[in-house]
Amino acid sequence: MNRLLLICILALFSFTASAQKPDTVKNKSVNDSLTRVRDSVVSKPVIPVILSKKNKKQYNPDSTHSPGLAFKRSGFVPGWGQLYNHRWWKVPLVYGGLVSLGLAVEFNQRYYKQYLRVYRLKQNAEQPGDGDSQDVKTLYNNVSGVSITAIEGAVTGYQRNMQLSILGMVGFWGIQMVDAYIDAKFIHSYTMDRDLSFKISPGVITGPVYASSNIPSVMPVLKLTFTLK
């Protein structure tokens, strides 16, 4: 009898413990499940910065830009090809070089004619006439004590300088044509990267120390630094 009573008491305790176990399914919050669904919809995928297309350099050469057209325009009118290539800053350089060479041609040609006239007058033992300009008359009087050989050398020198100036003008004309062609070729086929910078800063260079003096020589300089990014 006592044994049966003990078994009944143990069974009663076991039933009570099982009845007090919480139901996790019924206590589950509906708001938590809705929040998780909302977060999964709103959140965006994370894209690494390295794979972003914005960081990639875009190279877009202009295939419609004609190098031949730039070359021809520079041949017709100096600087026209540079304007076609949108290199505005080169136009003053082109005309500055051509004007300088043109002035050199005019200077040497003028003195070549004057010295040549004086040389012929000296060679024939003649005096300047009414048809000669005032510059020729002045030059004739200034070289009165100069030998004919020296005057002939001046004539040859001015003639040579005049010819060199003409050749320089023709060569400079051709150079600006080639320059326009090269710029147009780069625009047509390539894209020049602008990630280039340079910096000018003062500095000093120390010379070697000689045995006669313990003080090194110092020379001020300007340092030019190029940076490729």
Image: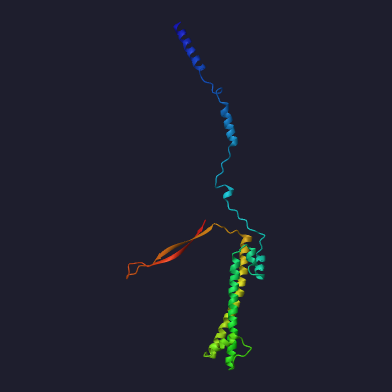
181 relative to 50, above or below: below
Q: Nearer the viewer, residue 147 or 11?
A: 147
Image x and y of residue 38, in percent: 59, 33
Image x and y of residue 58, in percent: 60, 53
| Residue for point 43% across, 63% down | 203
Q: Nearer the viewer, residue 42 or 88?
A: 88
Give the quadrant of residue 88.
bottom right
In the image, taking residue 80 as reference, residue 157 lies left or right, namely left
Image x and y of residue 174, in percent: 62, 71
* Display colour scheme: rainbow
Give the quadrant of residue 40.
top right
23 relative to 158, above or below: above
In the image, taking residue 180 as reference, residue 214 lies left or right, namely left
28 relative to 197, above or below: above
| Residue for point 58% across, 77% down | 104
Q: Nearer the viewer, residue 63 or 171?
A: 171
Q: Residue furthest top?
A: 1
Q: Nearer the viewer, residue 87 or 211?
A: 87
Image x and y of residue 91, in percent: 61, 67
**How many marks overall?**
0
